[in-house]
Amino acid sequence: MKLSQTPLAGLQVVDTEPVGDARGSFERLFCEQEWAPVREALRFVQVNLSTTAQRGTVRGMHFQRAPATEAKLIRCVRGQVYDVAVDLRGGSPTFLRWHAVELRADEPREVFIPEGFAHGFQALSDDAQLLYFHTAAWAPACEGGIRHDDPRLAIDWPLPVTAISDRDRAHPLLDDTFPGLQA
């Protein structure tokens, strides 16, 4: 496993190391011991799989507020996506900055998104699937979101947005009163 820091503190790109032979391959997606120097006692309590049927679809931008803030480890297991994280940590030097990572099923790469970030993605292929490992269980009372097309963020989506849920479309735009999240 190789961790690469992005311009947003705590947001990591994780390159895993598949081992292959004539039978196929084996790949470790997470090992608590290997993460210990970076993030002691990292523990996942929920695993989700999302399938996005149509290329161009955007899901997000989602987050959870305290006391259910969560970190996520995300892996594309089918197709490819443009995965975006936005720093919503109040007081962070990169507050409201975003960073994107292209994730593809045929590349051994993951992205680790720490607490205090919003997350979303755009499917770059039909039938894209993401596997999510979460450090906190979903808490409906703590969930929140921001608009994928918020002009204050100016996320540069690579494709025209072909589909987005009514719920995601209804997320508020950020204004000057948004204090950020406490991780």
Image (cartoon, rainbow, N blue to C red):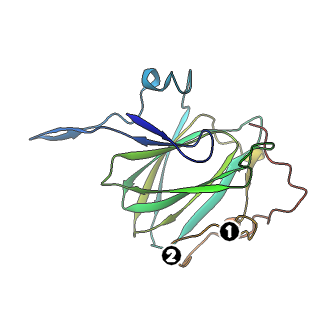
Query: As rendered, which of 94 and 67 lies closer to the eye?
Result: 94
Q: What residue type is labelled 2?
A: Leu
Residue occupying image coordinates x 26% and y 39%: 18
Q: How would you rate the neighbour count of disc 2 (Cα within 10 Å): few for under 14, some for 14-19, many for 20 or more?
A: some
First in residue order: circle 2 vs circle 1: 1
Q: Quadrant of the C terminus?
A: top right
Element at badge 2? loop
Residue occupying image coordinates x 34% and y 46%: 108
Q: Name the residue under label 2.
A: 159
Q: Is residue 15 left or right of residue 94?
A: left
Q: Name the residue under label 1.
A: 154
Q: How would you rate the neighbour count of disc 1 (Cα within 10 Å): few for under 14, some for 14-19, many for 20 or more?
A: few
Q: In which quarter of the image is the N terminus?
A: top left
Give percent across and percent down for residue 101: 49, 55
Hey, which residue is sitting farthest right in the picture? 177
Residue occupying image coordinates x 68% and y 68%: 154
Q: Is residue 120 left or right of residue 51?
A: right
Element at badge 1? loop
The disc placed on residue 4 is none
Q: In this view, does 2 lie to the left or right of 134?
A: left
Is 150 drawn above or below residue 19 in the view shown? below
Residue occupying image coordinates x 45% and y 72%: 55
The answer to which quarter of the image holds residue 121 is bottom right
